Amino acid sequence: MNGFTASELNELRNQFPALHQSIYGKPLIYLDNAATTQKPQLVIDRITKYYTFENCNIHRGVHYLSQEATAAYEDVRAKVAGFIHAAKSEEVIFTRGTTESINLIASSFGKLLFETGDSVLITGMEHHSNLVPWQQLCKNHNGELLVAELDERGEVSMEQYGKLLEQKPKLVAITHISNALGTVNPIKEMIAMAHANDIPVLIDGAQSVAHMRIDVQELDCDFFVFSGHKMYGPMGVGVLYGKQKWLEQMPPWQFGGEMVDQVSLHETTFNQLPFKFEAGTPNVAGVLGLGAAIDFLQQTDLEKIGLHEMIILNYALEKLKSIPGIRIIGNAAERAGVISFVVEGTHPSDIGTLLDKMGVAVRTGHHCAQPVMTHFNVPGTVRASFAAYNSLAEADIFVEAVQKAVNMLC
Amino acid sequence: MNGFTASELNELRNQFPALHQSIYGKPLIYLDNAATTQKPQLVIDRITKYYTFENCNIHRGVHYLSQEATAAYEDVRAKVAGFIHAAKSEEVIFTRGTTESINLIASSFGKLLFETGDSVLITGMEHHSNLVPWQQLCKNHNGELLVAELDERGEVSMEQYGKLLEQKPKLVAITHISNALGTVNPIKEMIAMAHANDIPVLIDGAQSVAHMRIDVQELDCDFFVFSGHKMYGPMGVGVLYGKQKWLEQMPPWQFGGEMVDQVSLHETTFNQLPFKFEAGTPNVAGVLGLGAAIDFLQQTDLEKIGLHEMIILNYALEKLKSIPGIRIIGNAAERAGVISFVVEGTHPSDIGTLLDKMGVAVRTGHHCAQPVMTHFNVPGTVRASFAAYNSLAEADIFVEAVQKAVNMLC
Amino acid sequence: MTIQEIQEQIVSEFSVFDDWLDKYNYLIEMGKEVPRIDERFKTNNHLISGCQSRVWLHAENRESKIYFTADSDAVITKGIVNLLIRVFSGQSPEAILDADTNFIEQIGLKEHLSPTRSNGLVSMVKQMKLYAQVYKLKQDN
Amino acid sequence: MTIQEIQEQIVSEFSVFDDWLDKYNYLIEMGKEVPRIDERFKTNNHLISGCQSRVWLHAENRESKIYFTADSDAVITKGIVNLLIRVFSGQSPEAILDADTNFIEQIGLKEHLSPTRSNGLVSMVKQMKLYAQVYKLKQDN
Ligand SMILES: Cc1ncc(COP(=O)(O)O)c(C=O)c1O
Ligand SMILES: Cc1ncc(COP(=O)(O)O)c(C=O)c1O
């Protein structure tokens, strides 16, 4: 199987209005997809249609608009369940994004299971959103945050990971793909190892759902979380998948709205799954947009997208390596999505500024993964991240722009 | 001053595409505005424009789109501050909605100040979102939730409220306007009374911001919270206003993303206000849509909107009273926004179903205020709630529809 | 009559109305004639959750057939409950488990029983099928 | 020279470039010539927060004028810092407090200093003005 043909890619790009604009008079080359992807017309249209004709608060409404909106909202729940191959729709909770999903679990799962001295095991490549909540949870229980360290390529040592599991953390929380390094963790193996020690596992899928097929049952992860806006969907919507057995036991996190069953002034009983975890008016437009984003991914063929991106990433990577003084940060054998680098004698923000002037949007800085920067002893990196709509031609322009920036700066 | 003229109202209605549709072949009469309002074209367009041309993740990005989106996002923060007359932009925190704002405060303010036996004072008319979080907070501290009771008109007794303040709750949390009864609480007086006892006050403004001018400094409330979707803005965005002195002291709630300053594997320092409380990628499109909703309110003239709604509400109220067997639930001297009622010998859901068939969208049920239903000894009510775009003609059709439904059912 | 036949009968009864008003008037009439649940069964145990109005449902097994009785405090709800009881009561567990409820759609009351709706009537059908399931298991053992 | 005059001078220097490339090359050159902060002041105390690159700023008061020195690990940042120092260094606290930074916009570098941008150069201007404020207060007392 190959990536997209030129005409397929052209058609695909035509679905994204944001790509067809100029920045400082140069055509935009958008390589900040790990931060957020652009949105296909079908996602934008779904939101517009909702607000134009269907807008209504959902659940418990007897009138037409409310019933229709409720049905549409619950349909997306089923669609998400299908997309990640969850056993049941009720295992899909809508949140505001990955960060909120993780905070929900840290708070609620923490309440359920954590006692003094309990710990969580993470890796050294976690995004702050999958690091700080666990660090604080451990701190609150006088427990130690266990960290599987990275080697010089940006991979976790499986041996050390295995050893840390023996310390019996209450939860393992690891990213599927590192947003700072592009490392793809061998999560299936890591989950199996944790389960062999009876330890549940949370997977941060923020950087993977848009790039590869996810099957939570096959992975057998206990939790899987991701954001709509990084998978061609809207901002302000995300997903928390959890195995029913955990979600049933976990106490609710936020209170109010649809998540209750019976309320008196001094007692409350809570609603069943999934509503128990969805307090307040949900972001209905966001959820419908997420549904459209899944339609887009399925129509376009997620496997083909992954392959296409890999071709471009490898191409750009090879070309970049020829730039004198460049140092690629993260050289895992399995990688996807992003290339991070620094150039000797330059600061990432200088390169980012000059690339921007050439129409190339990359991210620079610590990518909300400061410990990764510390590990590699860099102040930050320049990060190019790829999506379905990027092309080899764009990779060429990007690499030339980096060369040009380096020439100016050195 | 008067309400809108016929041509003003016509022009206003033309800004709302959702109003110009038919339900079961009848023109839609949307009287479920307390649940969520329809959106003016300018709000819809703002969101579309953002996703079409400006979409980007904000903060820390050096490239053009990111800088522009960041500026637009922070501009809305300043706009919201102006809209509610906050002293500083940093006192405005973007959340997902009223419910999240309240939960944030319950958790963070709770951590800051609550000790064993501490209590919160609310009223008997609170929405579950401003009840259950406090009930649970009190429960967790073995404290008692103090409740200022309602009289038969649905008003709080100021005398009892004053007495309860003497029990020194750590916080007073009251709704500005009841979503179930329409009661407007004398919050300025209630805040002053609480402050005289050195007790901070949270105002749930979910039902007031779209109907009247809010000046948080004049009110001198410590917290003021509301949702975008009930003020012509998008779903998935809300506001938490807090006095700087509280927000500075309060610990962060959710962790991850922009809310940190320095992160190492075992220590984290947090960012300054307002970022400290905004974890994860924010709903940028939602925030920009909220900005457009404020533009709409300011262009249309909020005071005139309030007056116009009052005229329609009073008109409908008087006409409804002539229906035999009707019982208006909530007869406060000061009321706004909603009319709640039951009709002897009928169930609210039956009336709601029949109204729906006649194109009239009302809400039926407990309106997430079960204790109010218990107080008035009803299984629920039929609730009509009004917005800027409703007309006297719609009020007529609504009342006739109620009469017709009652005729069928009795 | 089989479930299918009863459903067809109901559809033909409703087909004479071309106005929603008459349809609902008929439904309201039907609501008044629902086979009443014995008062002692009107407990939380028999309450269907998720309804705006309260709905109580009881099932009994006689000679391998299931008989339902019910009540609700809302009359339109009771009308629909009555339709469901007419269709399902006195049928075998197998027949109940196999049956669909498309007739509700055919008579133009789809808004009350569409499967993704989060209302109580959907829970009610589930509950009826659950009773059938339980009786079937008992039979099989 | 007054702040206004220096700003005009800078604007005219930049006006000869009609290409962003030349503008940035010039900025990079300027970055190399920033009045260097004394190494002993390169501490967290002198760090400007909110920058992607680190920026240290120091101020001194001589004869009612304020003199700035600075450094950064990013050269373009240093270039802009240098422009700000040229404008503000050696001026009176009052003049610094009154001055605007529109010249940045005029030379087409607005993206680096627009007030609602959450970047560190904005904090840097704030910090310079804060120093001026503090010296002014000291003077007045
Ligand atoms: C008075 C009041 N408080 C709180 C809420 C909760 O608002 P949201 O669902 O937008 O979080 C509502 C909305 O129903 C309300 O009317
Ligand atoms: C690996 C990873 N985890 C978590 C997050 C946080 O996602 P969000 O900001 O959408 O909550 C991100 C996004 O930057 C990420 O890349």
Image (cartoon, coloured by chain):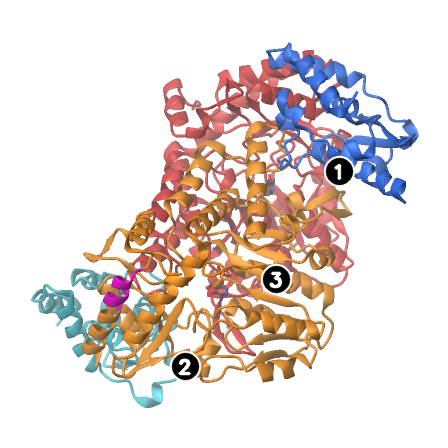
Chain colours: A red, B orange, C cyan, D blue
Quarter holding ligand 2: top right
Disc 1/disc 2 C-alpha distance (Å): 60 Å
Q: Is residue A275 left or right of residue D138?
A: left
Task: Tell me, yes or no, whether dots 1 and 3 are on the same chain.
Answer: no
Q: Position of residue B247 (x, y in %)?
A: 69, 56
Q: Position of residue D5 (x, y in %)?
A: 73, 20
Q: Using the image, tell me which numbered label, if any, was put on residue C44.
A: 2
Task: Write down the region rendered in magenta.
Answer: B391-398
In the rendered view, would you say C97 is above or below C29? above
Classify 10 Å Cα crowding around label 3: few (below 14), some (14-19), many (20 and above). Answer: few
Is residue D28 placed above or below B210 in the rendered structure? above
Q: Which residue is mark 3?
A: B218
Tell whether label 3 touches label 1 (CB within 8 Å).
no
Q: Quadrant of the C terminus of chain A?
A: top right
Residue highlighted by disc 1 = D49
- The secondary structure making up most of the magenta span is helix
Q: Amino acid at mark 1?
A: Ser
In which quadrant of the rendered image does the N terminus of chain A lie? Answer: top left
**Residue at 59% over, 22% down:** A356
Q: Residue at x 69, y 19 (%)?
A: D8
Quarter of the view holding residue A299? top left
Q: Is residue B57 visible?
A: no
Q: Measure how far apart labels 3 and 2 are at the Cα level.
A: 49 Å
Question: Does the magenta portion include A331?
Answer: no
**Comparing labels 3 and 2, the label whose residue is closer to the camera:** 3
* Three-letter code for the amino acid on which mark 2 is drawn: Asn
